Image (spheres, rainbow, N blue to C red):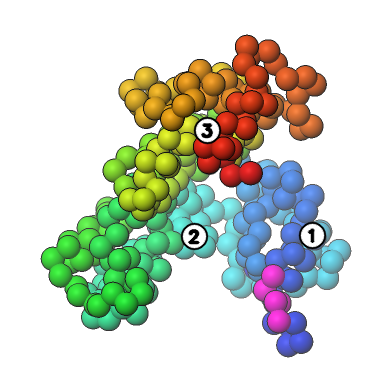
Amino acid sequence: MVNFSSLKCLSDSPHALQRFINTVFRDLIVQGIVLPYMDDIVILAKNESEAIDRLKKVLKVSSDYGLEINFGKCQFLHRKIEFLGHIIESNKLFPSLSKTKSVVHYPEPKTTKEVQRFLGLTGYFRKFIPAYSVIAKPLSDLLRKDTPFNFDVKQKASFDEVKRLLCQKPVLGIYRQNCETEIHTDAFAMADAQPVYGGHIGPGSMYVKIISSDSHEFFIKREHVITAHAVPHLLAVPELENDPDNENILELKDLSSLVIQKVCQYFAYKAQYFDGPPEIPNFDVDLEIALELLMAANFLDC
């Protein structure tokens, strides 16, 4: 815990502090020793001896840069900590008890502002709730411009369900950057769901985005391509598996599924190189033409 006083003449002093802390502890961050956020710093270790060694490094860096540590607010050698509204224990992540209590005791909203506060409180933990946006849609619809406030049966059911799910002690696995990563995406109903799996502990997060009816068909058709294009750094192998049960992949306007598969393979292959592959692999299709067709069909935003 580092003492910090807001700088009066600096309008973005919190950002300046974060940049300063990141600069000071840059080497330790790269080594995976510390995880800083503003004036809070978590020291990561596998056991007590490693924790003590790493603590010494943090204290030395703090001393070198003249940082003062409030030892009264520090916790040492804990296997369970609370950090940024989360409980971290045994490679698992939980919402903090204080936050879930706030959700449990949140009164039924009477105004749009109260709905907005509730969604802000629960939205912070949306990664714990599969299809959060779908469940909370009746509430979020109340925030639309020129929409009269009407807290009816649907809104009440949505409100109660969000509270129930968050109070069931949901748990996520800690995302492991060095492990194989799986992203499961499916443009089902009117939302796109993307659970992210890191390692073999379980889902690392749940992400669901509401899709408008106008863009629903478009979103389904470009789902496979945009995933490969947006997160190529997470794709470890050049072969991407198409879900045989997902018939939407085969309905790509005038483009064959073969072209889509080959372009996806190209993105995955390219991701293995920092500066791109030494030469474009022979996929038996003209990738330049394929990419032009994709852009013409609005499959890629370029």
- What secondary structure prevails in the magenta region? helix
> Which residue is more in the foreground, 126 or 242?
242
Q: Residue at x 84, y 66 (%)?
A: 65
Magenta segment boundaries in residue numbering: 11-15
Q: Nearer the viewer, residue 66 or 279?
A: 279
Image disc number at residue 82? 2
Q: Position of residue 111 (x, y in %)?
A: 27, 81
Q: Residue at x 65, y 54 (%)?
A: 35
Q: Amino acid at mark 3?
A: Val
- 68 part of magenta stretch: no
Amino acid type of the residue that numbered disc 1 sits on in the rendered structure: Thr
Query: Which-is-in-front pick, marks 1 and 2?
Result: 1
Residue 225 is labelled as 3
Disc 2 secondary structure class: strand
**Residue at the farthest left position:** 153
Residue 261 lies, in percent from the top left, at: 52, 21
Q: Which mark is residue 23?
A: 1
Going by the picture, which residue comes out furthest to the right? 64
Could you say where residue 1 lies in the image, as x and y percent from the top left?
Answer: 65, 68
Q: Do the residues bearing badges 1 and 2 touch, measured as CB atoms within 8 Å?
A: no
49 or 228, nearer to the observer = 228
11 up-or-down from 60: above or below: below
Quarter the C terminus occupies: top right
